Image (cartoon, helix red, strand yellow):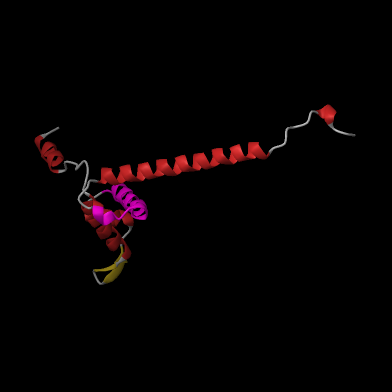
Amino acid sequence: MNIENQQQHQLQKRIKERFVYEAKFLVDQWRSIFEQRHLQDGKMIKYTLDQAADIVGISRKTLEDYYYCLKKAEKIIDINQFMNCKMGVIRRIIKEHKKQIDEQNLMDTNQFFALDEENKEPRKNSFEYDD
Protein backbone atom coordinates (compact mmCIF):
# COMPACT_ATOMS: atom_id res chain seq x y z
CA MET A 1 0.00 0.00 0.00
CA ASN A 2 1.37 3.39 -0.86
CA ILE A 3 0.94 6.50 1.28
CA GLU A 4 -2.02 7.79 -0.74
CA ASN A 5 -3.99 4.56 -0.28
CA GLN A 6 -3.17 4.50 3.44
CA GLN A 7 -4.49 8.04 3.87
CA GLN A 8 -7.67 7.17 1.99
CA HIS A 9 -8.12 4.05 4.09
CA GLN A 10 -7.74 6.07 7.29
CA LEU A 11 -10.31 8.63 6.12
CA GLN A 12 -12.83 5.92 5.28
CA LYS A 13 -12.63 4.20 8.64
CA ARG A 14 -15.85 2.32 9.19
CA ILE A 15 -18.06 3.17 12.14
CA LYS A 16 -18.75 -0.14 13.86
CA GLU A 17 -22.11 0.71 15.34
CA ARG A 18 -24.33 3.75 15.03
CA PHE A 19 -26.81 5.19 17.46
CA VAL A 20 -30.50 4.68 16.71
CA TYR A 21 -31.06 8.40 16.07
CA GLU A 22 -28.20 8.40 13.53
CA ALA A 23 -29.52 5.32 11.74
CA LYS A 24 -33.07 6.71 11.68
CA PHE A 25 -31.83 10.04 10.31
CA LEU A 26 -29.79 8.34 7.57
CA VAL A 27 -32.66 6.02 6.60
CA ASP A 28 -35.15 8.91 6.50
CA GLN A 29 -32.77 10.92 4.34
CA TRP A 30 -32.14 7.94 2.03
CA ARG A 31 -35.84 7.18 1.57
CA SER A 32 -36.64 10.85 1.02
CA ILE A 33 -34.06 11.14 -1.75
CA PHE A 34 -35.40 7.95 -3.33
CA GLU A 35 -39.08 8.96 -3.19
CA GLN A 36 -38.74 12.53 -4.46
CA ARG A 37 -38.07 13.67 -7.99
CA HIS A 38 -35.18 16.07 -8.48
CA LEU A 39 -34.50 18.71 -11.13
CA GLN A 40 -31.17 18.23 -12.86
CA ASP A 41 -30.16 20.03 -16.06
CA GLY A 42 -33.78 20.96 -16.71
CA LYS A 43 -34.98 17.35 -16.44
CA MET A 44 -36.90 15.68 -13.65
CA ILE A 45 -35.05 12.60 -12.49
CA LYS A 46 -35.78 9.98 -9.87
CA TYR A 47 -32.88 8.37 -8.07
CA THR A 48 -32.66 4.63 -7.51
CA LEU A 49 -32.06 3.23 -4.03
CA ASP A 50 -28.40 2.67 -4.92
CA GLN A 51 -27.97 6.23 -6.16
CA ALA A 52 -29.72 7.61 -3.08
CA ALA A 53 -27.41 5.53 -0.87
CA ASP A 54 -24.38 6.97 -2.70
CA ILE A 55 -25.69 10.49 -2.05
CA VAL A 56 -26.16 9.73 1.66
CA GLY A 57 -22.70 8.15 1.75
CA ILE A 58 -23.66 4.78 3.26
CA SER A 59 -24.01 1.45 1.46
CA ARG A 60 -27.48 0.41 0.39
CA LYS A 61 -27.13 -2.88 2.24
CA THR A 62 -26.48 -1.10 5.54
CA LEU A 63 -29.34 1.32 4.99
CA GLU A 64 -31.73 -1.53 4.17
CA ASP A 65 -30.62 -3.35 7.32
CA TYR A 66 -31.32 -0.25 9.44
CA TYR A 67 -34.64 0.31 7.65
CA TYR A 68 -35.95 -3.20 8.36
CA CYS A 69 -34.60 -3.30 11.92
CA LEU A 70 -36.29 0.00 12.75
CA LYS A 71 -39.50 -1.10 11.05
CA LYS A 72 -39.64 -4.33 13.08
CA ALA A 73 -38.71 -2.54 16.30
CA GLU A 74 -41.49 0.02 15.87
CA LYS A 75 -44.03 -2.82 16.02
CA ILE A 76 -42.57 -4.05 19.33
CA ILE A 77 -41.47 -0.94 21.23
CA ASP A 78 -41.64 2.83 21.24
CA ILE A 79 -38.52 3.57 19.23
CA ASN A 80 -38.25 7.12 20.64
CA GLN A 81 -37.27 5.72 24.04
CA PHE A 82 -34.21 4.05 22.49
CA MET A 83 -32.85 6.92 20.37
CA ASN A 84 -29.66 7.24 22.45
CA CYS A 85 -28.96 3.50 22.36
CA LYS A 86 -26.88 1.77 19.73
CA MET A 87 -28.42 -0.33 16.96
CA GLY A 88 -27.21 -3.51 18.68
CA VAL A 89 -29.77 -2.89 21.44
CA ILE A 90 -32.55 -2.77 18.84
CA ARG A 91 -31.27 -5.96 17.21
CA ARG A 92 -31.20 -7.68 20.61
CA ILE A 93 -34.78 -6.59 21.36
CA ILE A 94 -35.94 -7.97 18.00
CA LYS A 95 -34.07 -11.23 18.60
CA GLU A 96 -35.53 -11.68 22.10
CA HIS A 97 -39.03 -10.93 20.84
CA LYS A 98 -38.65 -13.50 18.07
CA LYS A 99 -37.40 -16.06 20.59
CA GLN A 100 -40.44 -15.43 22.82
CA ILE A 101 -42.81 -15.80 19.86
CA ASP A 102 -41.10 -19.05 18.80
CA GLU A 103 -41.32 -20.46 22.34
CA GLN A 104 -44.98 -19.48 22.56
CA ASN A 105 -45.73 -21.20 19.23
CA LEU A 106 -43.83 -24.29 20.37
CA MET A 107 -45.89 -24.45 23.57
CA ASP A 108 -49.10 -24.09 21.58
CA THR A 109 -48.09 -27.01 19.37
CA ASN A 110 -47.23 -29.16 22.39
CA GLN A 111 -50.55 -28.28 24.01
CA PHE A 112 -52.33 -29.25 20.80
CA PHE A 113 -50.74 -32.69 20.74
CA ALA A 114 -51.37 -33.18 24.48
CA LEU A 115 -55.06 -32.42 23.98
CA ASP A 116 -55.13 -34.64 20.93
CA GLU A 117 -53.74 -37.55 23.00
CA GLU A 118 -56.35 -37.01 25.72
CA ASN A 119 -59.22 -37.14 23.24
CA LYS A 120 -58.06 -40.22 21.36
CA GLU A 121 -59.65 -43.56 21.93
CA PRO A 122 -57.21 -46.43 22.11
CA ARG A 123 -56.57 -47.97 18.71
CA LYS A 124 -58.05 -51.37 18.07
CA ASN A 125 -56.00 -54.25 16.79
CA SER A 126 -56.99 -55.61 13.40
CA PHE A 127 -58.52 -58.77 14.89
CA GLU A 128 -60.86 -56.74 17.14
CA TYR A 129 -62.88 -55.29 14.26
CA ASP A 130 -66.23 -56.85 13.39
CA ASP A 131 -66.46 -57.97 9.81
Residue extending farthest front = 118
Q: Is residue 75 within the magenta segment?
A: yes
Taking depth in this image into account, of 19 and 77 the one nearest to the observer is 77
Q: What residue is at 16 percent from the left and 41 percent from the top?
A: 13
Span colored in magenta: 59-81
Residue extending farthest bottom = 42
Q: Position of residue 108 (x, y in %)?
A: 53, 42
Q: What residue is at 45 percent from the left and 40 percent from the top?
A: 103
Q: Position of residue 63 (x, y in %)?
A: 29, 51
Image quarter hosting the C terminus: top right
| Majority secondary structure in the magenta region | helix
Q: Position of residue 29 (x, y in %)?
A: 25, 59
Location of residue 28 by image quarter: bottom left
Location of residue 42 by image quarter: bottom left
Q: Is residue 3 within the magenta segment?
A: no
Q: Is residue 54 visible?
A: no
Residue extending farthest right = 131
Q: Is residue 73 visible?
A: yes
Up-down: is 114 above or below 58?
above
Q: Is residue 9 left or right of residue 122?
A: left
Up-down: is 31 above or below 18?
below
Q: Is residue 23 left or right of residue 8?
A: right
Up-down: is 122 above or below 39?
above
Taking depth in this image into account, of 49 and 43 the one nearest to the observer is 49
Taking depth in this image into account, of 23 and 45 the one nearest to the observer is 23
